[in-house]
Amino acid sequence: MTSGEPGPQGRWVGNALAEFERDLADNLCYERGTTAESASAQYVYWTLAVTVRDRLADRRVRTARANYVANPKFVYYLSAEYMLGRQFRQNALYTGTAELARRAVAASGYSAGDLEALDVEPGLGNGGLGRLAACLLDSLATLDVPAVGYGIRYEFGIFKQAFEDGHQIENPDDWAFYGNPWEFPAPDDLQVVGFYGHTEAVDDDQGGLRARWVPGEMVRGEPSHMLVPGYGTQTVNILRLWRARAGRESFDLGLFNAGRYAEAVAAQMRSENLTKVLYPSDSTPAGRELRLK
């Protein structure tokens, strides 16, 4: 796409400074409901990230359309974790907007370095397995291989490490406290997953019997996706992440009105614990069961 050419959805996502500045101001207004003069540093960072993300989203639409026409084979990669690293610097590099971002935010009184420091690494992985998975997705996009990564959208990373009196202290890694500007939630595409339950014999179409599983617990999986660009190419693949959501019937209004608040949300918490923490402790039977689920 050449500078000044409208994107596939009619938006302008060129790489001229004036275009980038206009997109930044528009995103501050329409995404955050504010202006550069009154926006906080967190708001300016979010908007800057979204403005860079717009360039990737444009490439993603083009990639999806090309794949639809070509109907190629896809690589589907499943991993329990993805150690993606901080997204802003990489995505600015891959879209050629690092210098544009630096110059565009200067008028707001912030430096790109100040804002980049607010970019939080997604708490989706820890160590070699997660880094391998992230590098594989990056390589597939760089080689223009159609691919989708699948994983779990953990609410908390494994932990933040600190030391006190010579002992390790583990604090929750609330990496998405301010949200994740690189993520596209898709709550309209919920999928139902069953656990526990029993089997029962039912008649099949041929007059015989077959076993049917009747789940004892239903959990809804809510997807979102992050964009995975390739280096030196226009290809953008996706990483599809899933988090657990409780069913609509999980909140007991009767118990809540009776003042039994913890019991009222017990079913909801039990369901959503599935994707609460990356690698829950397996030192207890409950922890081992949670890992298995």
Image: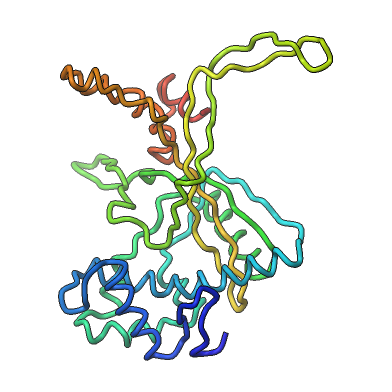
Q: Residue at x 30, y 76 (%)?
A: 113
In the shown orientation, is residue 256 left or right of residue 49?
Answer: left
Whole-percent x, y for residue 241 in the image: 50, 48
> From the viewer's perspective, is 207 left or right of 92?
right
38 w.r.t. 278: above or below: below
Q: Residue at x 70, y 13 (%)?
A: 211
> Is residue 177 depicted above or below 250 in this figure?
below
The residue positioned 34% from the left and 60% from the top of the image is 120
Quadrant housing the N terminus: bottom right
Residue 278 relative to residue 141: left or right:
left
Image quarter for residue 116? bottom left
Q: Position of residue 189 (x, y in %)?
A: 51, 45
Report whether 128 appears left or right of 85. Answer: right
Residue 67's image quarter?
Answer: bottom right
The image quarter containing residue 158 is top left
For image coordinates 29% across by 68% down, the residue present is 117
Identify the coloring. rainbow
Q: Is residue 126 above or below residue 20?
A: above
Number of numbered discs present? 0
x and y percent of residue 69 in the render? 73, 67
Viewer-proximal residue among 3 and 236: 3
Of 274 and 58, which appears nearest the observer? 58
Which x, y percent locates residue 242?
Answer: 49, 44
Q: Nearer the viewer, residue 142 or 210?
A: 210
Q: 293 or 16, which lies in front?
A: 16
